[in-house]
Image: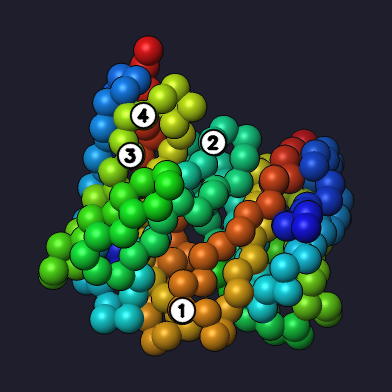
Amino acid sequence: NAGVTQTPKFRVLKTGQSMTLLCAQDMNHEYMYWYRQDPGMGLRLIHYSVGEGTTAKGEVPDGYNVSRLKKQNFLLGLESAAPSQTSVYFCASSYGEGNQEDTQYFGPGTRLTVL
Amino acid sequence: LAKTTQPISMDSYEGQEVNITCSHNNIATNDYITWYQQFPSQGPRFIIQGYKTKVTNEVASLFIPADRKSSTLSLPRVSLSDTAVYYCLVGAPNYGGSQGNLIFGKGTKLSVKP
């Protein structure tokens, strides 16, 4: 199993450009999450999903949109990138309902720079 | 949400036992306590989880007192490769707990010296 994978690994954008980050998991997890991590900071939750077709806002959702059209994929979109969105983005997934431990499995991260 | 408080940083030497304590005074009845480890340029990795008393696995031990208002992650005989940031999270949305398991905070930066 590949676990949680993220595409791309690195990306440089100009202010105002748009892009989509792809997260895929092959563990049949119900829940998926997008976090961002800035230097010297912990992870902050952007959006999450508790199942196919559902999404919910996290701690810092502004400037991002997400979609969960397939259970194994969770997409994070930036419609108009800003320098403040320069960060490392981590995707995670967990078993969700029916599993009381619900620990998260993380991807390797995407390093995004907005100029 | 059950807010957690843990030291910003800790130093240790190889071969020593390291104990990192996390405070979570308003933990909910159904909340679990979960610890993650993060190396530079990598995503966090699950270390250990518990509800009460003591849990031990091949990597660490987790001590939880009866009132569950704090927990201690114990790393036996640390090595240089244990240098990382350690996060304490509290929550369990699946079973009526809070969503604190989604709040990572800044964690504790452990530096192990030779």
Q: Which residue is mark 3?
A: B75
Q: Which residue is mark 1?
A: A100
Residue lying furthest front in this view?
A: B58
Q: As shown in the figure, which amino acid type bears the numbered disc 1?
A: Gln
Q: Give the crowd class for mark 3: few <14, some 14-19, many >=20 residues within 10 Å.
A: some
- A54 left or right of B106 in image: right
Q: As shown in the figure, which amino acid type bears the numbered disc 3?
A: Leu
Height in image: B113 above or below A8? above
Mark identifier at residue A82: none
Q: Nearer the viewer, mark 4 or mark 2?
A: 4
Question: What residue is shown at x 56% (from left), y 84% (from top)?
Answer: A97
Confirm or deny contact between disc 3 and disc 4 (CB under 8 A). Answer: yes
Give the spatial CA distance, label 1 vs label 4. 30 Å
Confirm or deny contact between disc 4 and disc 2 (CB under 8 A). Answer: no
Between residues A1 and B3, which one lies in front from this camera angle? A1
| Residue A63 picture quarter | bottom right
Q: Quadrant of the N terminus of chain A?
A: bottom right
Q: Which residue is mark 2?
A: B39
Give the spatial CA distance, label 4 vs label 2. 15 Å
Q: Give the crowd class for mark 4: few <14, some 14-19, many >=20 residues within 10 Å.
A: some
Element type at mark 4? loop
Question: What residue is shown at x 35% (from left), y 70% (from top)?
Answer: B32
Q: Closer to the N terminus: mark 4 or mark 2?
A: 2
